[in-house]
Amino acid sequence: MEAITLIDQSVCPGDVVLDVSTIANHTIKLGGGLRQDGDVISVTKSGTLRFSNPNKYWVQISQKRYVPQQKDSVLGIVVDSRSDNFLVDIKGPALAFLPVLAFEGGTRRNIPKFEIGTLLYVRVVKANPGMNPELSCTDASGKAAEFGALKDGYMFECTTGLSRMLLSSPTCPVLDALGKKLSFEIAVGLNGRVWVNAASPHTTIIVANAVMNSETLSGAQQRIMVEKLLQKIQ
Amino acid sequence: MEEAVVVTPGEVLGTTSDVKAGRGAYAAPHNDTVYASLTGFRRILPPSLDSSDQRPTVEVTGHKAHGPVPQPGSVVIARVTKVMARTASADIMCVGSKSVREKFTGIIRQQDVRATEIDKVEMHLCFHPGDIVRAHVLSLGDARAYFLSTAKNELGVVSAESIAGATMVPVSWTEMQCPLTGQIEQRKVAKAAS
């Protein structure tokens, strides 16, 4: 079974992607959603099979559940606070710990007081299977860099695939089209949470609805959808 | 000599001038009386001939067999249940070569995982939930768990399962390899007894 035919196609769990015995002397790197079962590489999660030169195969998955990964930027909600860290819900299998000192210039004297329910934009520092993930409100060099509590605005949930599309570069078409006509702030978490803030609730709702609708649309369709939405309003 | 006298905790077994308190008995400091601390059969052991203290020893042995209990200094086999940033919890399964009858929990702290560079230990590179470890009991610890240590060559992970589900083979004192996929995983590996 040649893998080449399945690249960029939708695959289901159980599909055999590659037979390792047919290619000798070649190392293949398997990413998420693929599993080696003896001689055969099979799919474990439904999605789109992707290949990157020279030898990386993975399945691009979009789901509502989030699996914490190191270096991801996510939106978390404070659930509890302990003496040495905050417990934050990031839509993963376990609550994440945010150390009270993980802020720029954080010392024991100026620990931020986050109430339960505060929305935070944080970075995942450590995410090992079986352990609670560790977060930080600073970037890798220790600067605050937009991390921290998000005030006002509206937060809604989406799939991880939509989050990745919104964060892709060049700018995602829906955000580009909205940005040309409206003025708003947006924060996208790779864990399937998006926060939008604008001067009026009217604008916030338009942006939120446009983003939620854009998951299955192509670039051109997204621009048409945004135009139609804005025409209806004005 | 065997006696079939059953005693309960708090029963008077004698005075300190007559008997010495052995296992299952204790001498109260405020009055010179020896009381039982367990339920069981009272046995009086004759004093050893060459000791200066010629009092017989009274002990209370259990009326049903107890499972072994971890004591400081004993080597235990435990299964890791939870791995956190600075500690790992484990369920103690065997003390020495006998399996325990009740549930005992142990904690392996970051500083007790190995003997060298103890502040640079990453717990997730030493243990994973489900690993079987051989550890040494440091102390009775706190109310929740015994303190365990794996800071010797022959202590550490004895058996572990890889992500693919196969029992891994030790490769070095920090690595184990899965026989099915060839993937290397990091653990604090116990040196196999030769």
Image (tube, coloured by chain):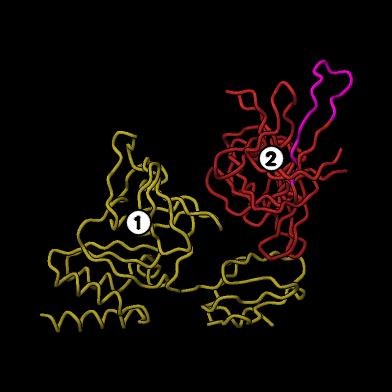
Q: Residues within 10 Å of mark 1 (few under 14, many from 20)?
A: some
Name the magenta segment's main secondary structure.
loop
Reply above or below: A191 against A88: below
**Numbered disc 1: secondary structure:** strand
- Looking at this rendering, what residue extends furthest in the left direction? A234
The residue closer to the viewer here, A56 or B71, is B71
When asked about the image quadrant of residue B134, the answer is: top right
Pick the front one: B80 or B48: B48
Q: Is residue A24 left or right of residue A164?
A: right
Closer-to-camera residue (A10/B170): B170
* Residue B41, image x, y percentages: 76, 43
Q: Residue at x 56, y 44 (%)?
A: B87
Q: Answer with the quarter of the image where residue A104 lies.
A: top left
Q: Is residue B145 left or right of residue A184?
A: right
Given the image, what chain letter belongs to the residue carrying mark 2?
Answer: B
Given the image, on which type of amino acid does mark 2 rest? Thr
- The span picked out in magenta is B46-62
Chain B shade:
red
Residue at 78% over, 29% down:
B57
Residue A177 picture quarter? bottom left
Q: To which residue does mark 1 refer? A: A79
Disc 1 to disc 2, C-alpha distance: 35 Å
Kind of residue at badge 1 = Val
**Does residue A19 appear left or right of residue A121 in this picture?**
right
The residue to which callout 2 is attached is B150
The chain assigned the colour yellow in the figure is A
In the figure, is residue A118 to the left or right of A9? left
Chain assignment, label 1: A
**Badge 2: how crowded within 10 Å, few (<14), some, or many (20+)?**
many
